[in-house]
Image: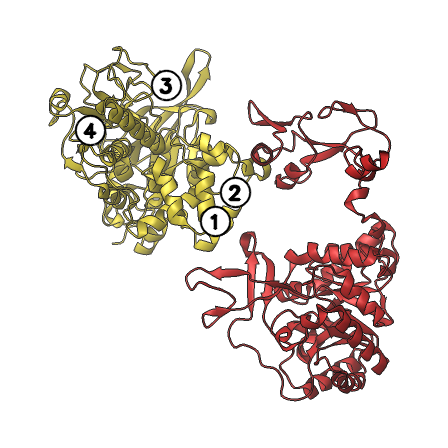
Chain colours: A red, B yellow
Amino acid sequence: MANLASDFVGIKSPNPFWLASAPPTDKEYNVRRAFEAGWGGVVWKTLGEDGPPVVNVNGPRYGAIWGGDRRLLGLNNIELITDRPLQQNLREIKAVKRDYPDRAMVVSLMVPCEEDAWKAILPVVEETGADGVELNFGCPHGMAERGMGSAVGQVPEYIEMVTRWCKQNTRMPVIVKLTPNITDILYPAAAAKRGGADAVSLINTINSITSVDLDAMAPEPMIDGKGTHGGYCGPAVKPIALNMVAEIARNAETAGLPISGIGGVTTWRDAAEFLALGAGNVQVCTAVMTYGFRIVEEMITGLSAWMDEKGYTSVADVTGRAVPNVTDWQYLNLNYITKAQIDQDACIKCGRCFAACEDTSHQAILMKEGRVFEVDDSECVACNLCVNVCPVEDCITMRTLDAGEMDERTGQPVDAEYGNWLGHPNNPQVVKAAE
Amino acid sequence: MQNTQRTPGVAAGRLDQAAYKNNFDDLHPPFEAHEASVAADRCYFCHDAPCITACPTDIDIPMFIRQIQTGNPDNAARTIFEQNILGGMCARVCPTETLCEEVCVRQTSEGEPVQIGHLQRFATDHMMAQDLHPFTRAATTGRRVAVVGAGPAGLACAHRLAMKGHDVVIFDARPKPGGLNEYGIASYKAVNNFAEQEVNWLMQIGGIDLRHGQKLGEQLQLEELQEEFDAVFLGMGLAGVNALRTEGEEKAHVMDAVQFIADLRQADDLSTLPVGRDVVVIGGGMTAVDAAVQSKLLGAEHVTMVYRRGRDRLSASSFEQELASSKGVKIILNAQPVSFQGTDAVESVTFAYTIDGPLGLEVSDETFTLKADQVLKAIGQSLDGVPGVLEIVGGKITTDANGRSSIPGVWAGGDCASGGDDLTVTAVANGRDAAEDIHAVLMGTQSPATDGTADAVTAAQ
């Protein structure tokens, strides 16, 4: 089995699977059970400053969307940071870390945007023996209204300033957790780097309303007839998270900044994808809130088996493997031509490819006698929609045309040379340069 | 003394009450809402879906399933009822395994079709449980139509005509409406008096007058109906039963399976129904299976179903055959009765094996004898009481694609007509389509002329 031991910014854990700062990591009871189940580390649910703890709503905290058979696809929450006293959390963190020295114990923090507040909390966390801190600049609900969480994460200057305060006031590694509720993830990531962050973690949850109660005419989750936006997470947000991780990993200014990948990680494969796009480890929340702690067993064995199969010997070996292949649209090879092809033996004749292509795309699928569906190469633009709507895996595939082969749609042979938009005759900038 | 399964002869009360209740309970319990949701999720919403093509009433199956899946079972029910007003019964009795579900692409891909029949029942039950009727009657046209037979064909025809504003009188020979839904379907397929409830629900459309004890050729004459009404629809099914013409057929406890099933359906207390210890059912259709299974469920110790041809010619579907086997019915193929033995009542039946050769069915010399204290004959039904003026081919009233008979102004559908094929759902389609044609003729949008022979749909031979 591949060695999954992880060293993330000096924080060691037996595997790269950490539980994210969230309801599952709010107390000793949960975290001990998570460690018993095999989780490599946790980010303890966000601590606030000393004093009376925050309070939570006493109605529903979560809203959800489901796929078939009520499979949970997306969850949103309006829970705030820990609502338990600071001292109690610190005692528990210390006790758990003492009993599980090989596991990563990172503590999430959120205090007001004042240096004294951070100066006050960092030493008491350090005293627990925790391995690091994560700055919660991401929470989009509730705390943001009080000038914390995503209210900080949306202002790069604040990120840089607070990160610097933390680095100056602790020996612990500082991970900055980023909010996706911004237009360009590179600005907050670069700010964290400038402030001296050891790593960034992303994404935090996304502003969202999961549904509307059409009888009460109010958003869910509904509290006494009213609702507010909450933080969206779970499998549905993974594509957004993957893109943001990849952007940080491939951008010159932020490249090399360690990334803890978060956002809809549900299976070993999700984790491998985050690693491939530049994450050094992953954090999980919604998946355990849906299925319980035991899923880590599948993640460990799955990732390990895949690494063995591919010959990767360490997590670091996987990290960033796919980053060189993430590029801008303008660099995509326009001379690369594919056509859909339908495996008639695998086809179950549902006709969904036909409906999709005929109604909404390029009329490139023909329906013939006996419900035989065939691709018309002279119309197929290779959009891939038929592949995506086909219920049978690998029934419709995209065939790459060989160089020199005729593209029946354009009547032109396939050019063997790479050619992108920058040199394309239809690009006005190219025309201008030629004039 | 309490009878048991081993009590000799024909006896009632072979089982305890709990066993009767259990044996004749719903064959398939209805879906709960979540089961329906999971089942509905499996539908791919196929383009030009094969299930629609396979449905004799062309129900938009993917659409009603999507309506269930999106939380609107009543809209789903309406989608069903627009095509098939007896969609509730069809959901229970349709041989879906040879119709919509057989061609489901999930059947192709996984051998497990979307459970269309169960989903249809979920939707139709949902609406009917609220006693909601989805249609309202159009303004009256002043036209009057006679419908003979209150079975699936007649009811579907009457409902569609009434909906379009015509005044309909249904005449039926039996004391209760429903036809085979009421008298012929196996009990466990339509529990809790569903057939009667469905008719009551259907009649909410208004404009339908139902008259019982009216049999064509006896209390009713076709000419009189033609005189009194603007159009006549014949949907009286096949009231006659075929005889075996076998030595000893007249012995006691040799009876028609349809009568046995009708008695069972009308019984208030199943423990009062006598059934043999050794029951032999002769025939290979749905009626034979229904009779065989139900005699087993009534407590017969041994039930044997004997069919004169091979398995490939059994008209009972594989699902029905499996059902029979699972209930303990033994099926013997390629044998036909040659004589019944017994002093007054039947005691045994002698069969000869048959050879299905190129010249037809031949009887071999090889015989065997089955102990039998009750014999149920299920060898087919026939037209009964139909006036000679109507053209009849192959034992069915000749009709064209619109249900027109050889006589102008007279339509026919269901089992009595050439377009029927012994299925409830086909009868509904016949009745509905004839109603549309009658409406078009009565409103002058369609020519009433027929060429005398009608565009005959050849009767299945």
Residue A252 location (% of width, % of height): 86, 57
Amino acid tagged 4: Val
In the rendered image, residues at marks 4 and 1 fall on the same chain = yes
| Chain of the residue displaying label 2 | B
Which quarter of the rendering shows the C terminus of chain B? Answer: top left
In the rendered image, residues at marks 3 and 2 fall on the same chain = yes
Contact flag, marks 2 and 1 (Cβ < 8 Å): yes
Q: Which residue is tagged 2?
A: B43
Q: Which residue is tagged 3?
A: B460
Side of B308 where A63 appears, left or right: right
The mark that comes first in sequence, 1 or 3, is: 1
Residue A132 location (% of width, % of height): 81, 76
Secondary structure, mark 1, is helix
**Mark 2, mark 4: which one is toward the viewer?**
2
Tell me if I can see residue A16 in this picture. no
Side of B399 where B42 appears, left or right: right
Crowding at mark 4 (Cα within 10 Å: few <14, some 14-19, many 20+): many
**Mark 1, mark 3: which one is toward the viewer?**
1
The mark that comes first in sequence, 3 or 2, is: 2
The mark that comes first in sequence, 2 or 1, is: 2
In the rendered image, residues at marks 1 and 3 fall on the same chain = yes
Amino acid tagged 1: Gln
* Mark sitting on residue A237: none
Contact flag, marks 4 and 3 (Cβ < 8 Å): no
Amino acid tagged 2: Cys
| Chain of the residue displaying label 4 | B
Structural distance between the alpha carbons of marks 4 and 3: 23 Å
The mark that comes first in sequence, 4 or 1, is: 1
Q: Which residue is tagged 4?
A: B148
Q: Which residue is tagged 1?
A: B69
